[in-house]
Image: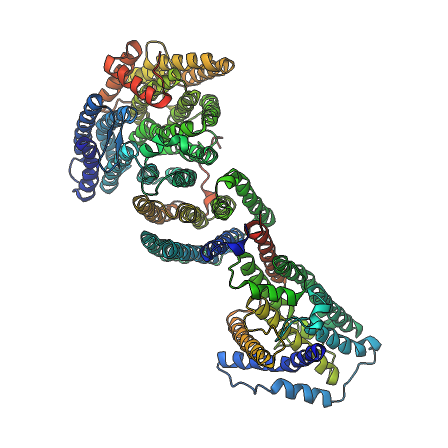
Amino acid sequence: MNIEQTDFYTQAILSMAALIGLTSFLMLGQSRLLRLIFVFALQGFLLTLTTSLAAHSLHNPHLYISAALTLILKVIFIPWMLRREVLHMNIHRDVQTLKNKTFIMLGGASLMVFSYYVLHPIVQTTAPVMLNALAVSLSVVLLGMLLMISHRQAVAHVVGFMSIENGLFFAAIVATKGMPMVVELGIAFDVLVAAVLFGIFFLHIRSSIDSLDVDLLNRLNEIEK
Amino acid sequence: MIAAYLVLLIPLIGIIFFAVADSKSDMGKINVYFNAICLLATLWLAINVLNQGTILSTSKAFLVDPFNVYLIVLTAFIGLTTSIFSAPYMAHEKEIGKLTDRRLKLYYTMYQGFMLAMYLVLTTNNLGIMWVAMEGATLATVLLVSLYRTPESIEAAWKYFILCGVGIAQALFGTILLYYAAMQIGDGSNALLWSVLYTNAQQLNPEILEIAFVFLLIGYGTKIGLVPLHNWLPDAHSEGPTPMSAVLSGLLLNDALYAVVRNKMLVDGATHSNIAGYLMMGFGLLSFLVGALFLHRQKDIKRLFSYSSIEHMGMMTFAFGIGGSLATYAALLHMTVHSLTKSAIFVTVGHAAQIAGTQRIEKIRGLIRTQPQVGWGLLIGTLAIAGFPPFGVFTSEFLVLLATMHSYPWLAPLVLLGIGIAFAGLFRHIQPIVYGEKPEGQLPVKANLWPVIIHLGLVLWLGLSIPGFLAHWFSQATVLISGSAPL
Amino acid sequence: MNWLIAILQGALFIALAPLLAGWLKYCKCRLQNRKAPSLLQPYRDLIKLSNKKPVVSDHASWLFITAPYLIFSATALAATVVPLVVVDLPTSASADVIVMVGFFAFARFFLALAGLDIGTAFGGMGSSREMTISSLAEPAMLMAIFTLTMTASTTNLSGAIAHVLNEGLVLRPSFVFALFALILVAVAETGRIPVDNPATHLELTMIHEAMILEYSGRYLALIEWASQLKLMLYGVLIANIFFPWGISETLNPKDLGYGLVAILGKLALLAIFLAIAETLVAKMRLFRVQEYLSFAYLLGLLGMLSHIILEASR
């Protein structure tokens, strides 16, 4: 199936998938926290656009609520909170050197290929377009995990965590036209609580190790020091 | 059905009550009352299910069948006994200045929040809500793990939060795939309801379900503590307050396994190949062996028993993976006895740590001379969990072994070996703790050992003879999960 | 007739290039609250320069003197390949996009040689920087263009534009990537902020200006004109490939008129965007340029990949 033969909605969804995938890559390569947070907000915004588009084209008004929730939580609230934290801790000028950036990027690319490989069996039963969107969302999830592995700052971990949520949300919108309303509200509630908890945690981590560098959290170990 | 709503409503009231309560009031006791009422409600629910069979609420939002009703009762029971233990324990922690009133209030609020999440995981019919509640359970407990605000506890809580959060995200992806498969055969609004999916399981696309199950197993498996996703578990158990360790080990792990088994039932219905079973067997056996080996090198008594939890959860996962009626029956029994024994052990360990003032194994010595009840409790609990004959754990482990020999005889030596290693690992640490030289000036603490006695008594009872109604229950659940009656 | 129009289009291209530069400067000045020079100022500059007697160093060889002519004619030839107001002309049919990139490479080669020829420190420094940047920019540019040509199944620019035009509005993820990649490359290749600053002669940061430091008089005029032409060329490339609407497909005078208006409008708009970007962004350190260009390459690659994965038929 060629893209010219698909409808406008599908084309738009695919473009959004590509852009969201791109933002994940951008986050992976960011070494400055504020820029990382900005790209995260951008990803949230793209997600909001996708959701509203889906709500409009599929005539599914409850997706507008999801879109609004995404906008409030992932574009405004969480980035605002993280930004404030970073400015407060005065770590926004720290350039965190990423070790083997090239390898991380290559790893990201191979994760993307891997997600296609994993989801390939689905291709027989579905439109290839949806497979693509699913694979992109899975790779956003995996790239979020890679982001958490490769960055040391707690803020970056939170961004990775939330971008994993973004990937899942995108999958839900694209593949299944949104989850049932209760579930979506439940997930949004969980995300909100998680965000608040992260805020509390920053406070605790800061007061205990006076930094947000997660590498300093290394007291618990199987090997006694 | 009212009973089921009541089970959910009581902890909800509990949360609100503790959130607004005056922190000077005797919250420990009130917590006990809440859990006691809840246990009564669950018993009422259980009687209903016993009389009527499976109950599906009119909105189809809740489903109570023989499989989850016994877990609900177990949850309520352990919730109650742990709350009985936690009241004096937390009071003691406050006395020695480790906690403030406000944190105590947070603790009780979150205790009820955790119970609510647990009941919701068990009763809901919607797989999406199940995920939400599972995540909710993490969120409720994460601040409890860091309740002492030491750097270690904050690290443990952070690890717990991040690992479980990321892990469980995989489960959501699996759920989305499941929903996607279900959307292809039916309408969207009911497509996440377990009861609907279960009746239409044959029509679901097997390929999608297999992939979905991999994600679900990884996701909920993180919560079960399956190796190699187990890193958070020993940390969270060792750094949180002891009652928290008891409910984490006794309830959270069980409920995560429950979620996996529920999903496995769907996958089995759709695929006919035993891929879900093999995956569970592999992960289960690996966790079992690794957990057993790690027992040997622990320095912290709570970490020791959390590795024991990993080991036992591995065994249950393995048994559910084998999948026949005998193995399923054994797994259900093991779930029960393990929860009872492990929460009893954590209660005694909590007291032992308070006596010695530390959790380090080499500093805890001579319990039997300082406070014989605690010493004996720990000794008997360890005997029980290691699978000594008169106790229920022995029965269930024996049944697992039997099922293994029946279905996969070549795996039986590995299981036996694991049991042996775990046995040795526990006893090399526990023996000096109980019988060793009593340090100077070690004094007994105020302890309420009734929960331990009740739990271990029940485990003993289950080992000697399984009461008729319980056996009936287990059989019903086994039929539901594996499709055929045991024995 | 076709050839006549082709030659006219080429001449128009060359004639309009300074105007675009003037417009860009005008926009930038207005954005920075300065009084803008007239739109025709670049023409006046060119005339003034060509009337002056050039001063050529004693050490300069024949290469130094011939280079400006070569550079200008290569760039002008490249310009004829790109459809400006009408597709399907004989000049663009005879050469494809790879030839166009080749013309650029040719011009750059002589520019770099001329920079080295005179033997001053700045010339050599500018040449080496220019070559570094272009060696990184060229793959990115080709990657972006290949994405487009794969979609159209032709490397001929005019064919590709006609393909995009006939297909109607299709949202392609690959085009989004390719567009961004091409914009980044265009900024680097034409020496604009943040890669190079055309307005300064700050010794440590200049690239393009360093190479042409020794030129004066009509030689300088030619080189300046060529670089204005290059800027316009990239602008037309972006405007006509990704937003081809308005370009004429027939030789009918009315359509040609529309085509001219359309491309002028698109270029004016593009220049405004560029001016805004140049006002907002600071010039980056030279050592970060490779990062910037590898990002452009990544975008081009992603565009190509998403074309293969997301769009191609299975």
Pick the quarter of the image with the N terminus of chain B.
top left
User: Up-down: is A60 above or below B298?
Assistant: below
Res A88 visible:
no
- The x, y position of residue C208, in whole percent, is 68, 72
Closest to the observer, A55 or A184: A55
Q: How is the image coloured?
A: rainbow
Count of marks overlaid on the render: 0
Can you tell which quarter of the image residue B106 is in?
Answer: top left
Residue plotted at (79% across, 75% down): C118
Closest to the observer, C225 or C89: C89
Closest to the observer, B321 or B202: B202
Can you tell which quarter of the image residue B453 is in?
Answer: top left
**Is C240 displayed left or right of B287 in the figure?**
right
Pick the quarter of the image with the C terminus of chain B.
top left
- The x, y position of residue B162, in whole percent, is 41, 41
- The x, y position of residue A112, in whole percent, is 54, 45
**Is B28 displayed left or right of C293 in the figure?**
left
Res B278 visible:
yes
**Is B378 displayed left or right of C200 in the figure?**
left
- The x, y position of residue C107, in whole percent, is 74, 71
User: Up-down: is C86 above or below C169?
Assistant: below
